Amino acid sequence: MKHASQKCLQIIGCGSVFKSIQVDIGRYCLDYGQINFVEFDDVSSIALNTASVLSDLSPEAADLFLAVDQNALNYARLELYGPAKLKGFKCTSMVHDSAALGVGTYIGENVWIGPNVRIFNRCNIAADTFIAACSTIGDDTHVGAHSWIGKNCLISDSVSIGTNCVICDLININAKIKIGRNTILAQPGLILNNVQSGTFHEFIYEKPGHMIGRNYSFSKRGVSK
Amino acid sequence: MKSLMPPEAYIDESWFLREQKLLFGNIWQFIAPYSLLSKTNAFVRRRVSGIDIIVQNASGQIIAYENVCRHRLSPIQNEDQGVRAMVCPYHGWSYDENGFAKVIPFENECYRFSAEERMSLKLNTFHIYRFGSLIFINLSDNPINFYDQFDSNGVRELKDASDLFDSEILVTKFRLKCNWKLIYENLRDPLHPRFVHSSTIYRHVKFKAEVDETAAAEAKLFDASKSHSRDDFLADLRSFSGGGKNEPMPDLPSYQWHQYVERYGQDDWYLNWLMFPNLHIASGSAGYSFIIEHHIPISAAQTEMWVYYVTGKKKRKYPTSAAVLLAHIKGAETVLREDFDIMEKVQSAITANSPPQMTGDYEYQNMLIEKWYLSLMEGRHGF
């Protein structure tokens, strides 16, 4: 197996995270012999072009970082991440050198930790999750896979965020709150109560949109997994 | 043609209350998709004709009750939808599937009702009809037969289509500052999309405004003051609901999720159904997914719009199903906002002194409904 410094890193994606990494690549302390950028035109071209982009690469020669903004509950990024993992690629994580990680905090693969992010102790940031600039995550918090936390968020201690969640900019989540999977919180402010899976808090709705059906409203009491 | 509809019909609260009684108090109205009620104790709470109503799955039966506890008039259910037994949160009274008070905590110690009083502790119930995957309610004590109101090829097609609705559904609500009739008039106006939706849905679906000469002539001949039989009155009502294939969609995009769901029909057409008075169901994906729009009149100048998005039944689970529904509702929201904007502007322009609307022959459906509606409102016909 090649050491990372002998391998190449392919950064594939589009959008604001991709561009911010491109202009700031020197601050991610990466140990790769070569770093290449492959940019898609937009998210709609990802599904169409993923196979051809990956077919030009081999897991032995290249690691990947898949940089796609939150779109459709992060499934646009998953359209890259899923096939890449099936082909056996290792995905690296990117932590900006101005970010700080606490003791015992675990970072999964293909995680992006943006500038000035603070993640306190014993947190678990699952794979394929992006945390944007200046956000803070308290002790013992779990962020599920394929999620997105926007800029200037404050996630307090012992919060649980499910998979495929989008927490947009300027949102504060109170301690011990549970946010179910497939949830969008897009209105800046304070979250004081648990949020059921499949809830879409966005400006466009007078009341939040709700997914109804198996594993949503019909789950057992509390937040569905 | 000069419209007979007075401005009061859109802005006057006393007119609105009369309309609630004469029209909405007697007809079958959509209340919710069945998938919201498929589990025991699943419920939907809506305000219909000013009545706080819960429709609940009570041990497998779908029952509609007035959402007012007989003790201190507290609402029994407080969420718009969910899964919860019929128990009042105030003092713990529970109700059985017939609406009778079942368990009253500390009944003998604290309430000491007589046998007669105890027997009277029953919630008001309403008639329910399940049509495919759509649940309808009728507030009348003696409702008309469901098929006296809805019976056409288009309506039967909608039943078949609704049987394909998946159990995973996205629901949200909008509030419009306009009279509910502006919405149904807008939905029956095929000319407006080229102006209002020119950069959105009209790019994909070329709605045509054509004159059905026979129907237009019939609409003009309809004499509201003439004494029609009740059968004619109901036949006219039935003619207001229907739909099906609306316009072809030659550039229908293909998405991966299409292969995971059942499709209604095989043709690349925009599907469009209108169930008078206040239900609109459409498929902008030619049968792979559906939007259900339910317009609930709140006041003369306010309407609540419940929007549901659902795909065809899943052939197998796929991980992006929530994202598919989310993307659909966001696309639909853009089109809906274009309609909301124009309808709210129309509403704000209507005053008691507004001149009559001048409708064209292509609006023959609205003409016929208008005359039928006025014959009801002016007491010449009734249910």
Image (cartoon, coloured by chain):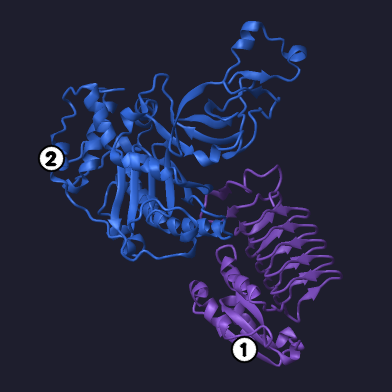
Chain colours: A purple, B blue
Dot label at residue A136:
none
Instruction: Tell me residue B75's x, y (percent).
Output: 60, 29
Looking at the image, is A60 positioned above or below residue B124? Answer: below
Looking at the image, is A109 positioned above or below residue B13? Answer: below
- Residue identified by numbered label 2: B217
- Residue identified by numbered label 1: A36
* Quadrant in which the N terminus of chain B is drawn: top left
Which quadrant of the view contains residue B109?
top right
Q: How many circles with numbers are drawn on the protein? A: 2
Do the residues marked 1 and 2 share a common chain? Answer: no
Disc 2 residue crowd, few under 14, some 14–19, many 20+, Cα 10 Å = few
Residue found 73% across the figure and 75% down from its top: A116
Instruction: Tell me residue B273's x, y (percent).
Output: 34, 45
Q: Which of B219 and B320 is in front in this view?
A: B320
Subunit bearing disc 1: A
Q: Can residue B279 be seen in this view?
A: no
Q: Nearer the viewer, residue A54 or A106?
A: A54
Residue found 62% across the figure and 37% down from its top: B83
Instruction: Tell me residue B328's x, y (percent).
Output: 47, 57
Report the amino acid beneath label 2. Ala
Which quadrant of the view contains residue A147?
bottom right
Report the amino acid beneath label 1. Asn
Looking at the image, is B117 positioned above or below residue B52? Answer: above
